[in-house]
Image (cartoon, helix red, strand yellow):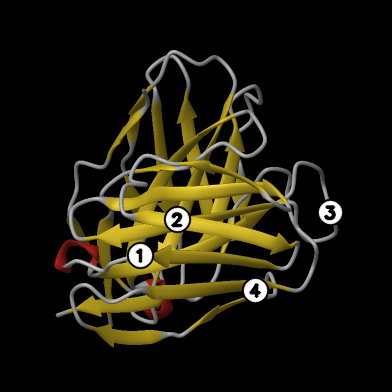
Amino acid sequence: AQTVTQSQPEMSVQEAETVTLSCTYDTSENNYYLFWYKQPPSRQMILVIRQEAYKQQNATENRFSVNFQKAAKSFSLKISDSQLGDTAMYFCAFMKHTSGSRLTFGEGTQLTVNP
Amino acid sequence: DAGITQSPRHKVTETGTPVTLRCHQTENHRYMYWYRQDPGHGLRLIHYSYGVKDTDKGEVSDGYSVSRSKTEDFLLTLESATSSQTSVYFCAISEPRLAGQYSTDTQYFGPGTRLTVL
């Protein structure tokens, strides 16, 4: 069974600064996906970024980037130039590299961006 | 926007009553999922579907059933609702291949349904 751990229940950052959210996971799989989802107060689950384990290059999406360390089973999310709209709960999630597999989520990190 | 709607968006019901939640998608995605979200647990899979009439259980399936008679609709039924089923329910879709704006095997979520069982 897979587990995902987010050790920071809450974090805060000043607008325009950079913040890093941590995620570690445990699995015996060699090929898998990792995701970060964002859940703002509207409750909508929004995909932020996706990483395939066989790709060594870290994924980036505009201001969002990851630091994927496969051997350490670590998958952190870096948000650059933080904006007020980034305030949300962020979930790290794991999925086997098999179509139709379930997502295993961490418990989330509540990020607050302060003006 | 993955073209996913959920209905109702909010529902309050009483213990012992049947409840059906509907997930509707407009883009013929093959896989559909039902998750529940509870404080301290993130999201957990209830059931999923890999095609019309093809469904399987997730990690928290007790007390729930599902049906998928059409590609676009995936129904979640609580046969006799209990207070422990008070939760926020999310539907998701995915495709096993790259399809337009949708990444392979990536799950995209609907807006959620808040269910309260009194």
Q: Are marks 1 and 2 in contact (CB under 8 Å)?
A: yes
Q: Are marks 4 and 1 in contact (CB under 8 Å)?
A: no
Residue type highlighted by circle 3: Ala
Q: Is residue A68 visible?
A: yes
Residue under the image location 30 percent in, 53 percent down: B42
Q: Label 4: which residue?
A: B24
Q: Which mark is residue B65?
A: 2
Chain label for disc 3: B
Q: Amino acid at mark 2?
A: Ser
Residue A76 appears left or right of A98: left
Q: In 3D space, how far apart are the residues under numbered discs 2 and 4 (Cα atoms)?
A: 17 Å
Q: Which residue is mark 3?
A: B99
Residue at mark 3 to residue at mark 4: CA–CA distance? 18 Å
Kindly identify the residue that appears in the image at 39 percent across and 46 percent down: A92
Q: Is residue A39 above or below residue B68?
A: below
Q: Is residue A17 left or right of residue A71?
A: left
